[in-house]
Image: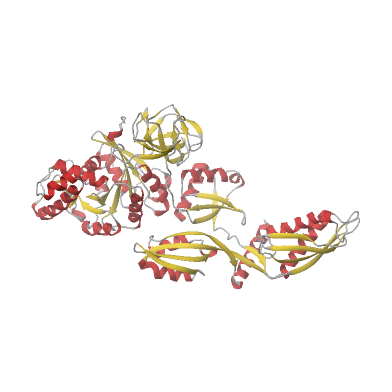
Amino acid sequence: MKEYTTENIRNIAMASHSSSGKTMLAEAFLHFTGATTRLGRVEDGTTVSDFEEEEIRRKISLSTSVIPVEYKDVKINFLDTPGYTDFVGEMISALRVADGALILIDSVAGAEVGTEIAMNYCDQFHLPRFVIINKMNRENANFRKALESVQEVSEVRLIPVQLPLGEKLDFKGVIDLLTLKAYPGDGSTAKDIPAEYMDEVESARMELIEAAAEGEDTLLEKYLEGEELTAEEIMRGLKAAVLARAFAPVFVAAGSAEIGLASLLDAIINLMPSPAEAAPAQAQGKDGIEELSPRDNGPLAAYVWKTTADPFVGKITYFRVYSGMITSDSRVWNQTKGAEERLGTVHLLRGKEQISIKTVHAGDIASVPKLSLTSTGDTLCDRAHPLTLPVPTYPHALYQVAVSPKTQADSAKISPTLTRLAEEDMTLTWHQEPSTNQTILQGMGDQHIDVAIRKAEAKFQTSLVAELPRVPYLETITKPGQAMYRHKKQTGGAGQFGEVHMRIEPYKEDDYAFSNDVFGGAISSSYMPAIEKGIKSVMKEGAVAGFPIKNVKVSVYDGKEHPVDSKPVAFEIAGREAFKLAVKDAGPVLLEPIMSVRIVVPEANMGDVLGDLNTRRARVQGMDTEKGRSIITATVPLAEMQRYTTDLRSITGGRGVFTMEFSSYEVVPAHLAQEIIAARQKELAAAKEE
């Protein structure tokens, strides 16, 4: 593949709901332009985009792949993103480095949840977009109906630039309103428009010319004075309107049948911005924000938007150059990590195929293997001219599993493996939960976590077992209590003796307080640290159900010691057992974490969501509406929210989203506490037997 300069590059993300045909359209482009000799199929696992074993097995895209297509001396870097909601992080990363987007729509299903999500992110990144009504050769395809459904979820006006030539199984090609020609098949040859379409074409063309005229003041004047606009003027006005995001042009295609490809590629070249025409990138420099224009001789600024682990090559780092150039075998400065990286051979990627290249010009997307420190979101620049490019905000993952190593050998690898997985995927995080002593992996949903665990095994040779995380319950007391315990052990020779009397009471100010209230030297003060050590060990492992204890004030007020047999260990045991007995005397209860939850759903689902919340012991705090969506705020016990991500999706058809954060601890209702205690004691007994 030859080198392309900034003006001859287009970076276009393909985003939409799952299975609207992004991967097959990319495949068709490659075949049409002669980059591949045969058309791959998703069903057979032979596409260039979906090359990972997991993608072939599931028959869906799980990560973004780069598909460069060379056409008419322009290189279009298509970024084929996954449409499944769990992998939204991949779509965000791709849109971050794209200059335009193709939103694909299944002609039968119309606008779906993923369409809405993709549109919203395009708005967030201020990206010009095309809407493509795809799969027009399907049995129940309906161009008008699909178009109307998209307009309902799009704030940007949609203007058809093409109409379908035939529909459903008779879909033969496209009618182009710009050239007023019909293009059957892949669109490489033009024909006259059949007479029966002329009325529809005339009215659609009027709408298009009007929209084009709005793109430029001089054209609008000319149009309003009743003058004809030339084809070149229409194109110029259209481009200005597309770049200003005044509207989104609508195209028709059938990727799998290779229909409508040529005119779509022409439109991408003519209407989508090159990196030079896109809005300049903003970067944080030494003296504030710098505006970067994509010039080869500008200061180096490259954004790392994706990293993957390849079992054969090692780590592959994908980057986009916003300013300056990157060459093979050079050194760059990683501003985010504050370290220098040495680049080996730089590659252009086509799926998994690596095409080595000497120079990556400003605006292009490429990759480099084996960088040791660099991870997703980092900025590469010149050490003498430090720059930091902004990292997009990723949604907060709320689906949690507890992971544990399958074998002893895996336990040493679990931390580095999870760290690598989280570096690759900005929507994956992990942490150690001290109260339950579990390793928690957080992702966007069950599929997301499942893929991550399979990746850990396939790429990092670490086998993990996932289970529902334990809820971090706590124990506390509700009234004062007291107890005494005498520890006496006589086994020939020196014995052990220690007697401790203690009172405890609820203590709201802090987790724990200890006082030595012994008068007259019944227990030497030198034994107090040992007694306290015993108490703290019980506070850690619990006295009722094996959960940590908090909010307790302890007073040791009496006891006995033996001049020969008393030792610190004897008082540690006596302190521990006396504390356990005192807790049982002080009305112990279980506390559970309560979460503040904010749920945003379509108004139509409001009743179902509220009904479901009632079954989860939720207390609804308030309800509101915003942009036709309902917002519910509530407090809900964490135990009831463990799998809410999946449940909310099924109630709202994937349209509902929620955020959740810790609010407080509250007492568990008595009938539930009994079940939790019984289950926990069973668990602890099983662990002891092991």
Report the number of discs: 0
- Residue 362 drawn at (x, y percent): 35, 33
Q: Is 602 drawn above or below residue 36 in the view shown? A: below
Quarter of the N terminus within the rendering: top left
- Residue 595 drawn at (x, y percent): 52, 62
- Residue 316 drawn at (x, y percent): 44, 37
* Colouring convention used in this rendered image of the protein: secondary structure
Q: Give the residue at x 41% y 36%.
A: 302
> Viewed as shown, does residue 17 lie left or right of 420?
left
Residue with the most extreme front position: 287
Quarter of the C terminus within the rendering: bottom right
Res. 17 visible in picture: no
Quarter of the image where one finds residue 529: bottom right
- Residue 661 drawn at (x, y percent): 51, 59
Res. 416 visible in picture: yes
Q: Is 571 drawn above or below residue 416 in the view shown? A: below
Q: Is 52 drawn above or below residue 18 in the view shown? A: above
